Amino acid sequence: MKKNWIEKNLTAFGIQPNLIDYSKEQTTFEWEKVAEQFDGLPCGGFNIAHEAIDRHANGSLGAKTALLWLGENGERKSFTFIDMKKQTAKFANVLASLGFGKGDRIFTLSTRLPELYISALGILKNRSVLCPLFSQFGPEPILQRLVRGDAKALITTQALFDKKVRPILEQLPQLQTVFLIDAIDDENHQIRSLKRLMDNASDIYEILPTDLEDMSILHFTSGTTGMPKGVVHVHKAMYNHWSSGRYVLDLHPEDIYWCTADPGWVTGTSYGIITPWLHGVTNVVDESEFDALRWYRILQNEKVSVWYTAPTAIRRLMRIDCEPTKEYDLSHLRLIQSVGEPLNPEAVVWGVEKLNMPIHDNWWQTETGAMMIANYLSQTIRPGSMGRPLPGIEAGIVHISEDGTATEITEAGKEGELALKPGWPSMFRAYLHNDEKYAKSFVGGWYLSGDLAYKDEDGYYWFVGRSDDIIKTSGHMVGPFEVESALMEHPSVAEAGVIGKPDELIGQLVKAFVSLKMGYEPTEELRRELIGFGRKRLGAAVAPKEIEFTQNLPKTRSGKIMRRLLKAREMGLPEGDISTLED
Ligand code: ATP
Ligand code: MG
């Protein structure tokens, strides 16, 4: 096992990492010290937008680039912290002038345009609630979320409005205003040109007293396991954003940071908007969708030093035939972090071979609001492990008994539910309209994540699977991740999704859906070879008994393999909520 570990050479870092001694940070950490990082509002309280933007604009970073925006067609715009302060003030004034205020739910539905980032922070300045939607949703999922979220206003583009919102507008009587980012004129008193309103708004806005417990963001989950849940966050979440920016993203003032996630998902707000700016770091935003060579060019041309992306993107980069470090100058890149799905050990090692550095995996959820478990720049990586809890976070593996009590499993290697001690600042404060579900997430002094994992003797956490995805076969419990990762070690396999297929004899049979790398044909011979390969790696009890080739696995729009859909299709059952299914 140990031979695969990736040790770090502490003398080789150009910039001293923020975290060097993990145990010391763990034991000396105090949230009060994080609180001291913040400025506070002149009139009282703490507001994310003030700490992320105004504080820097008023201080020594005013002229520094905050947002570096790359348009789809090669356009490039940059906004300093002062520009961002003024623009977000204008938007807050627009909202206030129309009577929107504290607690009002303001939705965004936009591609990654500068206005999306400006309005997100303007909403927070105005103490309204930012509710981001993913721009590729169709009318039905948009309607559902606007209704469930009690939307008062929506910011979108003319094209998205005409295609997706106009058809459902009549069903949204509570929606008072639609702001169109790129419309020149108002259509009527309800559908307004954002540009016109912004042109006429003052660029001075005094944020009113904001309580750390005031609601800041309403996010909908990815819908990987079922109907997406509305998750409520508060301004205090920035404590975790700041500390994870320091420990995990290792942000330093001179960094150029790029998070590839869309603000329609929690990674895109927590780490694509809030965290880099809390640290006063230049944040790159690319309007475009995934494009391997474009991405390498961005890393090169913008001199990106810290990069936060996802396993699905990394697996796509692994598919293409390219020697990135030979073809591009990636010499500024010093840290790659990944979240969203289990990161196969194969992908971590690919990073070492092709990018000259491992990919660092970290684990969290919409509900946790920020990273909870991570691999750190200065610390040894055990490929396949999500890493260790962040300073300030207490994690554990618990067993839930039949009668619903939770007992911590301290024994190394023993699987159970991944749980967290409640009370970290970015912990969600509610599931929208579902108090019962919220209450049920907390058992015996733990927040239960719904993921299964185990801890090794040194406190590294290893993901097993979502509890819904666990396969029970011949009396064994099999996690799909283990099987998928083993298959990915075969040179032909680009991606795999593994499910349990009901079987009279053994309960469930392990079945793998496999998509192949370029240049490989889905032949019977290869299928048999993969079955044999799986057996050798995993043993007969765990290895897939059936393999089916497929060109693409069904995924959420945030890039997660939807095993529940593979299973429903396999069994001919209804597909359930597919609002987040990728086209
Ligand atoms: P839903 O709750 O609607 O089914 P979801 O759980 O996919 O959707 P998110 O909150 O976006 O919605 O994703 C969090 C989940 O993603 C985690 O609970 C975990 O299952 C998975 N995940 C995230 N990061 C990792 C990681 N590093 N390793 C393994 N799994 C991860
Ligand atoms: Mg979830």
Image (cartoon, grey):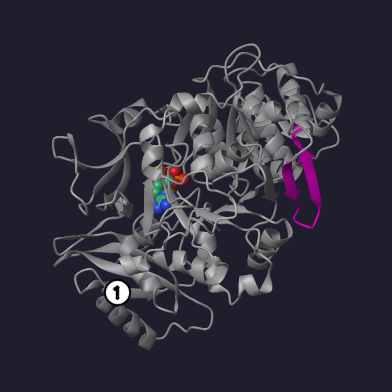
- Find residue 447 and report its image quarter: top left
**Count of labels in the image:** 1
- In which quadrant is the C terminus drawn? bottom right
| Amino acid of disc 1 | Glu
- In which quadrant is the N terminus drawn? bottom left
Specify whether 207 is left or right of 542. Answer: right
- Find residue 295 and report its image quarter: bottom right
Q: Residue furthest front?
A: 11
Q: Which residues are magenta?
A: 66-81
Q: Which residue is mark 1?
A: 546
Q: Residues within 10 Å of mark 1 (few under 14, many from 20)?
A: some
State the residue in front, 218 or 453: 453
**Predominant SS of the magenta segment:** strand
In the displayed structure, 155 sits above or below 550; it is above
Residue 286 horizontal/vertical position (percent): 69, 52
In the displayed structure, 465 sits above or below 436; it is below
Q: Residue at x 53, y 24 (%)?
A: 36
Q: Residue furthest bottom?
A: 525
